[in-house]
Amino acid sequence: MSHPSTDLQHRQLIDRLHAERCSCVIGNGGQTRLFRERGVADLYRLLTEEPALLDGAFVADKVVGKGAAALMILGGVKEVYADTISTPALELLTARGVRTTYALEVPHIVDRTQTDWCPVEKLCRDCHTAEECLEPIRDFIEHIRPTS
């Protein structure tokens, strides 16, 4: 059953994703947050530091690869919209019952130079569950994060 007010709210979040040039917009319980980091850094930080924001949330994202999908699942995201989603990400979300809509499905996400697979997509390629993806993502994030 469709909920018109919810659908309208989701449409508004998707519109903000594009209008404000965000990488990701998250709506949950009347709270809206905009994110601009590339890759999975924002989602990983939310999962580890502010998990309540993800639990039951609607996420509008520019690009959803398998790693991002895994983090959304682990955070309890209820619904996802992606401009571009990889087939492995879509399969992971669908298998966990996350309602997912998208503009474009691709076999895999490519890196920023368009010459290879996205590094996180590659790390998660052989993982079968969202839980299996977490450790390689954590290692990747900790490796790329500048030390202070």
Image: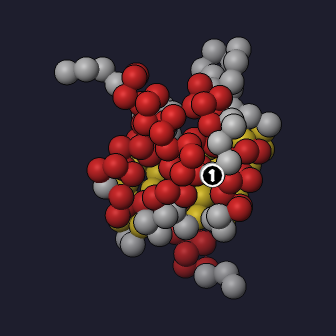
Q: Is residue 27 shown to the viewer in this render?
A: no
Q: Position of residue 52 (x, y in %)?
A: 35, 64
- 15 above or below 31? above
The one nearer the camera, 105 or 117, is 117
Placement of the C terminus among the 4 image quadrants: top left
The one nearer the camera, 29 or 144, is 144
- 58 above or below 37? below
Placement of the N terminus among the 4 image quadrants: bottom right
Q: Position of residue 57 (x, y in %)?
A: 47, 65
Q: Position of residue 125 (x, y in %)?
A: 68, 35
The one nearer the camera, 146 or 79, is 146
**SS for dot 1:** loop
Q: Is residue 133 shown to the viewer in this render?
A: yes
Quadrant of residue 53 within the rendered picture: bottom left
The one nearer the camera, 64 or 147, is 147
Residue beneath the point at 63% across and 51% down:
129
Quadrant of residue 99 within the rendered picture: bottom right
Quadrant of residue 104 within the rendered picture: top right
Residue beneath the point at 51% across and 34% down:
136
Q: Is 50 left, or right, of 67 in this rendering? A: left
Q: Position of residue 132 (x, y in %)?
A: 57, 46
- 58 above or below 38? below
- 85 above or below 31? above
Q: Which residue is mark 1?
A: 129
Q: Is 104 left, or right, of 23 in this rendering? A: right
Which amino acid type corresponds to the residue marked 1 in the rendered image?
Answer: Thr
Residue beneath the point at 43% across and 36% down:
138
Q: Residues within 10 Å of mark 1 (few under 14, many from 20)?
A: some
Residue beneath the point at 61% across and 82% down:
3
